[in-house]
Amino acid sequence: MNHPDSHPVLLKPYTHLAPEDGMCLMEYVSVLAGTEFSDHPACTDALLGALARAVNDAMSDQGRCELLALASALAESGPERPGEDRITYHCWDAVAAASPPGSAAQRRARRRRDTALAPHAAARRAEGVLRWVRVHGPARRAVETAVRTLAALPPGEADRSLYRLLACCIEEARGHTAKHVRPAVSA
């Protein structure tokens, strides 16, 4: 993994044409990974990247600086599918936690959270749902709803909650990748 030798990085919201114009979190990940400058680097799963871009754009300037601590983990998380059901689960769980207790929004989020890990979700994965549907369908809606809900919290709490959500999902992705790496056979 390449580490930029330039000035300290100041993450900015949205996409940029070149590093000189600024970088969002995922563009910085592409630089760290030594890939083409992009906010969709191939080294990170598409759904996890969508969450990282949404969190980056929703955070305050001060909170966004904290995201630099997660960049290396994102670059190393791998392009494999990290279990979108687990990411979806964490997103709906975050919505339920941020919603008023007993509210319809909280009940709806808990139902969706519980459905994300239901047995039919595994069957849906086994059928090989197209990547586009996964990234732009129900899992993407969970990401967008979670980020929108957490961003509406009071500023400091919003940044902390968004950071925790992204960090948790990165750990899920890294754990998934580690489970699929075959250990070396010793002689």
Image (cartoon, helix red, strand yellow):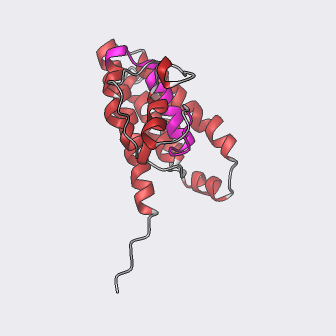
Left of 45 or right of it: where is 106?
A: left
Q: Residue 180 location in percent, x, y?
A: 46, 63
Q: How many marks?
A: 0
The residues colored magenta run: 39-62
Taking the spot 68% from the left edge, 41% from the top edge, the residue there is: 133
Q: Is residue 53 magenta?
A: yes
Question: Looking at the image, is 40 positioned above or below residue 106?
Answer: below
Q: In the image shown, does 178 or 165 lie closer to the viewer?
A: 178
Q: Residue 161 location in percent, x, y?
A: 34, 26
Residue 103 in view:
no
Q: Residue 115 location in percent, x, y?
A: 53, 44
Task: Name the dominant secondary structure of the magenta segment.
Answer: helix
- In the rendered image, the residue lying farthest to the front is 5
Q: In the image shown, does 14 or 126 lie closer to the viewer?
A: 14
Q: In the image shown, does 100 or 125 lie closer to the viewer?
A: 125
Question: Looking at the image, is 104 positioned above or below residue 126?
Answer: above
Taking the spot 64% from the left edge, 53% from the top edge, the residue there is: 124
- In the rendered image, the residue lying farthest to the top is 154
Residue 32 in view:
yes
Q: Is residue 95 magenta?
A: no
Taking the spot 31% from the left edge, 34% from the top edge, the residue there is: 69
Q: Residue 64 location in percent, x, y?
A: 36, 22
Q: Quadrant of residue 150?
A: top left
Which part of the image, by quadrant, shows the C terminus?
bottom left
